[in-house]
Amino acid sequence: MVNVGVIGSTGYAGAQLVALLSHHPHVSLTYLASHSYVGRSFSSVYPSMLGSCDLVMEEEDLEEASKRCDVLFLALPHALASKKVNAELLKRCIVIDLGADYRLSDVASYNHWYGCEHASPSLIAQAVYGLPELHRNAIVSANLIANPGCYTTCSILTLAPLVAEGLVDTSTLIIDSASGVTGAGRVEKTDSLFCECNESFKAYGVANHRHTPEIEQELSLLAGRPLMVQFTPHLVPMNRGILSTCYASLASGIGEPEIGQAYRKWYADEPFVRLMGSSLPETRFVKNTNVCAIGWKVDQRTRRVIAIGAIDNLVKGAAGQAVQNMNIRCAFAETAGLASSVVNPL
């Protein structure tokens, strides 16, 4: 058993994390922090958790939390974790950051895309990018794990085999992703109001979304050279889910057999990647699971591959992946406490 704490426990990602951890066979939830609900039980904020997690929430104190916890999850907006994490903290406990502060290996890129100065750049070199399907071996010994973004998880996993195996022209990569409203967080925003987003579909963050450099960083590592992608996110009037439709021109001589072979080579043994081939994924196929479902089509007319990935943005795109990282780091079964199949198939 490990003692675990969550900072930012009442946001959408934080609450999903608490729900997963409360049923984890190797976890004892010992510390929950939420500035807005100090002194209240978690189940008083989320009544569906009554009896599952009635822990009283405390004011945030990372020093105290690190003394009581073996693993500390940070579910905070960007620019906060880098002000709170330090070397002494990392000596006492494992930190898994669900925010953006340690995802980018280049501090100048972080400062540019996030519009602020990174508060602890000396720790970036210690951080491991927590996408298990690509960095499992490094996660095993890391005390600072940067949980990937939701759009990035879906996009990178969908494109990784194509890029790594040299099957596509990387100068032609285009990603159109659509996310449910929980991706915007639990903070009150006009754009997230029911009347603003219901019965509508829109693009946002066009040409400047902050997940772009994260996608480029990981795909560049796979390609062995710097590359750029055209990434456009969209808001869908549903609670949760991400669908990423990725386009690329095929390399010379590449067709359907090589594409299928590459996906099977990379993901045949991955517990949370479901290959659907030409049967394309939908967000409802992975709802409330830690699965990334991937399908693809080769368009012989245009000589392009269209690869489509689907995840639950709050599970594989956030809390579930954080638990997966904890499982790897703590030598638990990687699938412990995580669902790989939907409860309702409809």
Image (cartoon, helix red, strand yellow):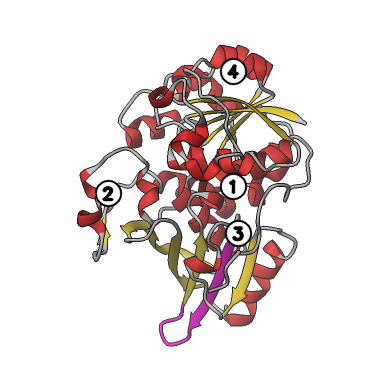
User: Alpha carbon of mark 3 to alpha carbon of mark 1: how far?
Assistant: 9 Å
In this view, the mark in front (4 or 3): 4
Type of residue at label 4? Ala
Q: Quadrant of the N terminus?
A: top right
Foreground residue among 300 and 124: 124
Type of residue at label 1? Gly
x then y, percent, for residue 30: 64, 25
**Residue at image mark 1:** 320
Tell me which label, 1 or 2, sits earlier in the chain: 2
Residue drawn 63% across and 75% down? 260
User: Alpha carbon of mark 1 to alpha carbon of mark 4: how far?
Assistant: 21 Å
* Occupied quadrant, residue 340: bottom right
Residue drawn 64% across and 50% down? 134
x then y, percent, for residue 214: 46, 44
Tell me which label, 4 or 3, sits earlier in the chain: 4
Tell me which label, 1 or 4, sits earlier in the chain: 4
**Residue at image mark 4:** 65
Q: Cβ–Cβ below 8 Å for labels 3 and 1? A: no
Task: Identify the secondary structure beneath mark 3.
Answer: loop
User: Alpha carbon of mark 1 to alpha carbon of mark 2: how far?
Assistant: 23 Å
Residue stretch in magenta:
292-304
Foreground residue among 201 and 231: 201
Tell me which label, 4 or 2, sits earlier in the chain: 4
User: Alpha carbon of mark 3 to alpha carbon of mark 2: how far?
Assistant: 26 Å
**Residue at image mark 3:** 291
x then y, percent, for residue 263: 64, 68
Q: Residues within 10 Å of mark 1 (few under 14, many from 20)?
A: many
Give the vertical position of 308 relative to 328 (above or below).
Answer: below
Query: Could you tell me if residue 244 is visible in this image?
Result: yes
**Residue at image mark 2:** 192
Give the vertical position of 240 relative to 5 (above or below).
Answer: below
